[in-house]
Amino acid sequence: METPGLADGDEIRARFSRRMSDMYRREVPQYGALLDLVADVNAAALRREPALRERLARAGELERLGVERHGAIRLGSARELATMRRVFAVMGMRPVGYYDLSVAGVPVHATAFRPVEDASLARNPFRVFTSLLRLDLIEDAGLRMIATDILERRRIFTPRLLDLVERAEGQGALAGAEADELVAEALQTFRWHSAATVDKATYARLHDAHRLVADVVCFKGPHINHLTPRTLDIDAVQAAMPVRGIAAKTVIEGPPARKVALLLRQTSFKALEERIAFVGEDARAPGTHTARFGEIEQRGVALTRKGRARYDTLLANVRHGSPGSPDRDYAGRLAGAFKDFPDDLTALRREGLAFFRYARTSRGSRDAAAAGLSLEAQIERGLVRADPIVYEDFLPVSAAGIFQSNLGGAGPRSYAGNAAQAAFEHALGAPVLDEIALYEAAQARSLEALHAKVSQ
Ligand code: OOG
Ligand code: NI
């Protein structure tokens, strides 16, 4: 059991992510092997780069290096999504961003539940990429009815969890023991069930419609399908995975390797084939299901709308709009495409491509003349510091790549790409926050604080 006393959202999230990690390691031993590899690679990076170690130590990030950054689930109905929003709210997580995966042949749309305050992100950064199945994209009307019916009847939250969520909503926090209980009850929603809730034939029909449809519809709950620790050297982990017998996806998603890390780079090991049991007469003829995998991520600076538009265009040129597996020379072509994208912090800042947090240095606070200088002049003279703001969200093309690599070689389906943010928000019962607006606000707040100090 954890510490007694009152537990706020940040504390509950920290406990939840720790317990989830323990559970997932027990459920998917290969994930433990990935964590070991990441720990080794991170340790080597810290030995190799003392400056990096120092920077992380100063930021208080060294001891949290091994803490998972995110996980993902896939939900089946509006009711499930709306309730999940309440559960995550108790853990200090808000829905940020809208991701349309239909353009990439995956019949879901999604948001990321995450902490939004700097202090909360620093305390525990855990977030959950949460998809909602788009039943409207199942073509066969009969099958769509079957799926809808199954999903309307299932209950993925324990009654006790719902009680505790209501209590927390009323009080804004929970007593320590109640928080532990809430975490334990919430974990029930995320655990794996090797027993399917349907017979073999129904599973097969849903699976034929799309593998993800079977994954969402045929089980008692929305099992956590991966967890993702942070690595300091994603290229090293990617190279070492096969050496340790871990089947890595072909390429690293996101921007190329650079001096100044941009946005988010991710890679994963392929979903494992697991034995499942069907209901009815098929109970003695087990089948297999692939859904669960492990992933790693490396985060860089958040890009402004201008920077992001440039990133999206460059990436699209390299991928030629194809969400399928990129070819062998992909990394080379990707690096080539980004050759003209500035790769130093000053240029990224001056060209308005990335977000920064500004703060007066101790010299700056002593220098009365600073007030009369432009921001650039103050930065040049070391009176003001500009620190890059880390990107805390996801990338739709990357997410599609992660989904695809876990569809076991089944090629992408084509859906007429149609974002449906309004429908998603209706199901969620709330609007999603605009991720770029959050970075804009953080940068603006830091500038305001700077000016406020100067005018004092
Ligand atoms: C989610 C895949 C997307 C990411 O990190 O981009 C994702 C899923 O497979 O359910 O987790
Ligand atoms: Ni992920």
Image (cartoon, rainbow, N blue to C red):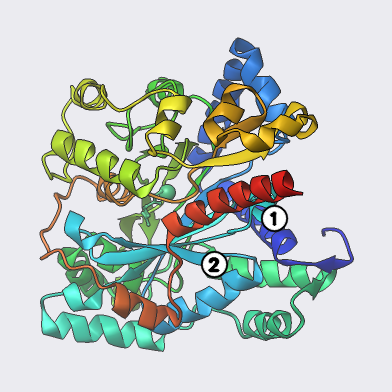
Q: Residue furthest top?
A: 48
Task: Judge left or right: residue 272 versus residue 205.
Answer: right
Q: Quick one: 181 or 345, which is closer to the camera?
A: 345
Given the image, on which type of amino acid does mark 2 rest? Arg
Measure the alpha-carbon separation of dots 1 and 2.
15 Å
Q: Residues within 10 Å of mark 2 (few under 14, many from 20)?
A: many
Q: Quick one: 288 or 334, which is closer to the camera?
A: 334
The label number, if any, that marks residue 14 in the structure image: 1
Q: Secondary structure at mark 1?
A: helix
Residue visible at 10% across and 65% down? 416
Q: Earlier in the sequence, mark 1 or mark 2?
A: 1
Residue visible at 25% across and 70% down? 203
User: In the figure, residue 93 lies in which quadrant?
Assistant: bottom right
Q: From what the image shows, is residue 33 above or below residue 243?
A: below
The spot of residue 25 in percent (x, y) is 57, 46
Q: Is mark 1 within 8 Å of ligand 2?
A: no
Task: Judge left or right: residue 210 versus residue 416.
Answer: right
Task: Judge left or right: residue 171 versus residue 98.
Answer: right
The spot of residue 150 in percent (x, y) is 33, 84
Q: Quick one: 101 or 162, which is closer to the camera?
A: 101
Residue visible at 34% across and 75% down? 424
Q: Secondary structure at mark 2?
A: strand
Residue corresponding to mark 2:
94
User: In the figure, residue 238 lies in which quadrant?
Assistant: top left
Q: Quadrant of the N terminus?
A: bottom right
